[in-house]
Structures are given as C-alpha cells and as structure tokens.
C-alpha cells in the first residue's frame, strides 16, 4: 500500500466531468438539479456508458449528471480525493462505486453531511451501509450464477475452469462473482463458494486459478495466452472484466491464431466474458467462434436508474433500498439464449 502525497495527487489526478443536460429549464420549473457519479475510473467503457445513461436521463428532465473519477487503475486514495471534491460542490446527490468501503467511510464520507448518497456497481460493506440511501446495479450472486449457467450450457458434463479477474484477490466485488460461479457449477448445497472446485458436478479448477490483476487489454491477453499455452488443460474461461475484448481487432489478431491451433487439437476452450452492451465488432467475435458468450451488465440502464433514484431523493420521495438491473446473455446467432436463473 502506498501513500499518495497531495502534490503528486494534484499532478496525476484527472477528474473527468460530462457536463450534459445543461439546456435551460422552462421558467415555470424549479432550478435544475445537479448530480454526480463518482466512478472507480473514467476511462473504462463500463463506467463511460453508465455516465452516458445518467446524463441522457438527466438532460431529458433539464437536470445534469456528471461523471467524476480518475483515469488508469482504480485506487481508493485517488477515489477518496475525487469524492472530497464532489462533496465540496454542493450537489443534489452523489452515486458512488465503492473501491474501499472502510477507508472512504473514515475519510471523505465523514464530510457527507446532508448530501444524498447512493452506491452503484459496488456497494459499501454492511458496517458502512447506513451512509447510503440505496444501491443501483445488479444482483452479483444471481449474475454470477448465470455465468455458471452459461458454462454449463457449453460444458454440460463439467470441465476444467479458470476465472480471470481484473481486481485483486481481496476485492469484495470479484469475490462475490467467484463465489456465485462456484456455487452454480458445484450444484452442491453445502459448497459455500470459498473453496476451489475439485470435482463437484464434474467441475474442477486449475491450481493456477483464479488469475487476478489484469487492468489493461494487453495484460489480460498476456494472462490468457500464457494460460492456454501452458498445457494446463483448462477448457472453460470466465473473464470477470471486458478487457480481453476492449478492442475486438486486437483480440482477434493476438488470440485468433492460438485458438485456431487449439481447435485443430480439439482443445478449443469455452470463453465467456462479462462486458457492457457489446457493439457489432464484439458481437462478430461470437459468430467467428473466438468468444462463446457475453453476459452484459446493461450499463446505460444502470445510469438511467441512478438518475431517477437520485432525483427522487432530491425531491424527498422514497426510494427502493436496491434497484437491480437484469443481465442479458449474447450468444452466437445459431445458439438459443440461456434463461436467467431468476
């Protein structure tokens, strides 16, 4: 853990704001409301799309929704500084994607005051959850179970799994995903998801997995290429971030030849990737057989629901403690959809 000095923070911190929805409101209406999303990072497509969804919904109502954060790998100290700046803006509401629950609660959130706070994507820990008024995102356990269902669709007899994660081994968000996947695949009620699969329901995990820490496309591709070239006999890959296909052309160029060689050996792995709404270039990878499935986080809808939750709080109206967004599976055109577990 490192200590970021204020002078260094000022040099490297890049707060990005999407000032949309600034059209003048009709005279008969109240003053426009201004909200902010404090993301883990603002150069990731997932958070960009959430910001766009919130800004579009706000603009339609004459309000503003700002996307705030830093570029590059997420760090709780950097996010804490952004959150402090957001709280100083006298905003009508803030939505926070949590990097480190206790740290933020002990620092920036001590200045929360009367500003309505909700969380999105990543929630506060139970001990700090009293600080926020609601959560917008998806049910991580149900989402992870659907990832497991996709794996079972392609490997009904079981397989040898490796999970790739952009976060670290102690990141609560990714641990929830891993737990849900293992519970779904094991089909053993007593399997809590904390332990590596070792034959339950035909599923096992490589000793080298899960693999953590890829926060760029190049690092994600390097991890996967190394894994598939190592003779580990992994036949099912679940990536918990979209970095692998950040640019579809780079993925195709770097991984395509290796997958073609594995196909000749009848050893082509099933590759399932969490991603925001995939565009045409990413969907093309499905029909080329370079990816077997995406599970989409429906990011713009998360952004829209963030706006409406903050809007209701600003109007002193009640809100749901949790607003959960449904996931969507994308498969090759020739494949049927996989139904949601619940």
Image (tube, rainbow, N blue to C red):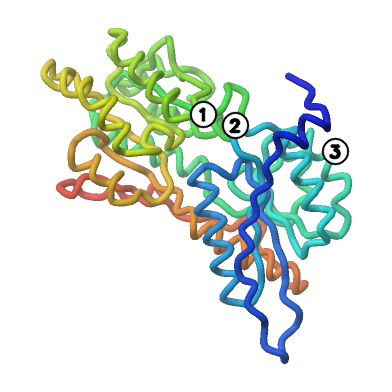
Image location of residue 120, percent across then percent down = 62, 50
* Picture residue at 25% right of the left edge, 24% below the top: 269
Of callouts 2 and 3, which one flags the residue occurring earlier in the amino acid sequence?
2
Labels 1 and 2 touching (C-beta < 8 A): yes
Q: Nearer the viewer, mark 2 or mark 3?
A: 2
Q: Which residue is mark 1?
A: 215
Q: From the viewer's perspective, is residue 326 above or below residue 270?
A: below
* Picture residue at 43% right of the left edge, 34% below the top: 243
Labels 1 and 3 touching (C-beta < 8 A): no
In this view of the protein, which residue sits in the foreground, 183 or 296? 296
Q: Give the crowd class for mark 1: few <14, some 14-19, many >=20 residues within 10 Å.
A: some
Q: CA distance from mark 1 to mark 2?
A: 6 Å
Of callouts 1 and 2, which one flags the residue occurring earlier in the amino acid sequence?
2
* Picture residue at 28% right of the left edge, 46% below the top: 281
Image location of residue 235, percent across then percent down = 27, 21
Question: Outermost residue, left direction?
Answer: 264
Q: Which residue is mark 2?
A: 73
Instruction: State the quadrant of the N terminus.
Output: top right
Q: CA distance from mark 2 to mark 3?
A: 20 Å
In this view of the protein, which residue sits in the foreground, 111 or 56? 56
Q: Give the crowd class for mark 3: few <14, some 14-19, many >=20 residues within 10 Å.
A: some
Q: Nearer the viewer, mark 1 or mark 3?
A: 1
Image location of residue 225, percent across then percent down = 33, 18
Q: CA distance from mark 1 to mark 3?
A: 26 Å
329 left or right of 116 in image: left
- Which secondary structure, mark 1? loop
Q: Quadrant of residue 205?
A: top left
Q: From the viewer's perspective, is residue 6 above or below residue 228?
A: below
Q: Give the crowd class for mark 2: few <14, some 14-19, many >=20 residues within 10 Å.
A: some
- Which secondary structure, mark 2? loop
What's the mark number on residue 107? 3
* Picture residue at 41% right of the left edge, 31% below the top: 239
């Amino acid at each position: 853990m490192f200590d970021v000095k204020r002078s260094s923070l000022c040099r490297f911190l890049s707060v990005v704001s999407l000032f949309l929805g600034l059209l003048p409101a009709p005279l008969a209406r109240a003053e426009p409301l201004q909200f902010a999303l404090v993301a883990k990072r603002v150069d990731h497509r997932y958070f960009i799309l959430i910001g766009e969804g919130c800004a579009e919904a706000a603009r339609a109502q004459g309000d503003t929704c700002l996307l705030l954060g830093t570029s590059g790998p997420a760090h709780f100290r950097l996010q804490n500084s952004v959150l402090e700046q957001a709280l100083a803006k006298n905003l009508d509401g803030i939505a926070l994607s949590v990097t480190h629950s206790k740290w933020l609660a002990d620092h920036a959130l001590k200045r929360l005051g009367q500003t309505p706070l909700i969380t999105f994507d990543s929630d506060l820990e139970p001990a700090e959850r009293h600080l926020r008024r609601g959560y917008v995102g998806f049910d991580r356990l149900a989402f992870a179970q659907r990832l497991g269902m996709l794996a079972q669709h392609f490997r009904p007899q079981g397989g040898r799994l490796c999970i790739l994660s952009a976060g670290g081994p102690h990141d609560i968000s990714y641990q929830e995903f891993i737990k849900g996947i293992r519970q779904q695949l094991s089909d053993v009620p007593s399997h809590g998801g904390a332990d590596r699969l070792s034959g339950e329901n035909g599923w096992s995990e490589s000793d080298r997995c899960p693999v953590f820490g890829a926060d760029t496309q190049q690092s994600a591709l390097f991890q996967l290429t190394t894994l598939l070239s190592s003779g580990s006999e992994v036949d099912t890959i679940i990536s918990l971030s979209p970095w692998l296909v950040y640019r579809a052309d780079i993925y195709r160029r770097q991984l395509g030849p290796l997958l073609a060689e594995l196909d000749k050996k009848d050893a082509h792995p099933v590759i399932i990737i969490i991603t925001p709404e995939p565009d045409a270039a990413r969907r093309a990878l499905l029909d080329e057989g370079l990816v077997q499935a995406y599970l989409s986080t429906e990011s713009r809808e998360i952004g829209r629901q963030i706006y409406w939750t903050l809007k209701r709080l600003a109007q002193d109206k009640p809100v749901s403690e949790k607003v959960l967004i449904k996931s969507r599976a994308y498969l090759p055109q020739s494949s049927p959809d996989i139904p949601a577990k619940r």
